Amino acid sequence: MSPAERKARRQEDREAKQRQKEEEQRLREEEKARELAERAAAKEREAAERAERKAARAGGRRRARKSERAESERRQNEPERLDHDVVARIRQYGVTPSPGEPDERGDAEPSPQPPLPTDPNEPRDAE
């Protein structure tokens, strides 16, 4: 091999090594950029999830407070009402409402007295 050929060969080897180094450097930079993008996306997702949870907690508290307030106002604004069966039980046991409290059913016909409670194990007669 002549000196010119050896020189050309060394030059080619140097260029090949340089290209290989550049390629490895480029791959490392791409990997680094990909990792940074993944971290940034993960941070963004976490921040969005955190904000969503915070908003849900705050919204839940706000809704709960609003509904509690509305419920208490509604209770204060409407008179207390007893179910028909509660009124019937009160009558059955001899307790009558005070004269100032109107009957829940208004001027409706009074209901017949319900039968006295019996043992649930005894068979009932046909009525």
Image (cartoon, helix red, strand yellow):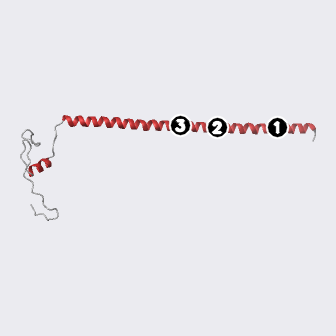
Amino acid under label 3? Lys
At a point 80% along the width and 36% down the height, the residue shown is 15
* Residue 118 screen position, x and y as percent: 12, 60
Considering the numbered disc 1 on the image, is that residue within a helix, a strand or a loop?
helix
Q: Residue 14 carries which label?
A: 1
Q: In which quarter of the image is residue 65?
A: top left
Q: Which mark is residue 40?
A: none
| First reached walking from the N terminus: tag 2 or tag 3 | 2
At a point 20% along the width and 35% down the height, the residue shown is 76
At a point 34% along the width and 34% down the height, the residue shown is 62
| First reached walking from the N terminus: tag 2 or tag 1 | 1
Of 7 and 93, nearer the camera is 93
Label 3 CA crowd tier, 10 Å (few <14, some 14–19, many 20+): few
Considering the numbered disc 2 on the image, is that residue within a helix, a strand or a loop?
helix
* Residue 106 screen position, x and y as percent: 9, 41
Question: On the rendered structure, is 105 left or right of 10?
Answer: left
Q: Which of marks 1 and 3 is in front?
A: 3
* Residue 43 screen position, x and y as percent: 53, 37
| First reached walking from the N terminus: tag 1 or tag 3 | 1
Q: In which quarter of the image is the N terminus?
A: top right
Q: Residue 32 carries which label?
A: 2
Q: In this view, does 101 lie above or below 118?
A: above
Label 1 CA crowd tier, 10 Å (few <14, some 14–19, many 20+): few
Amino acid under label 2? Lys
* Residue 58 screen position, x and y as percent: 38, 35
| Alpha carbon separation for disc pair 2 and 3 | 16 Å
The residue beneath circle 3 is 43
| Alpha carbon separation for disc pair 1 and 3 | 43 Å
Label 2 CA crowd tier, 10 Å (few <14, some 14–19, many 20+): few
Amino acid under label 1? Arg
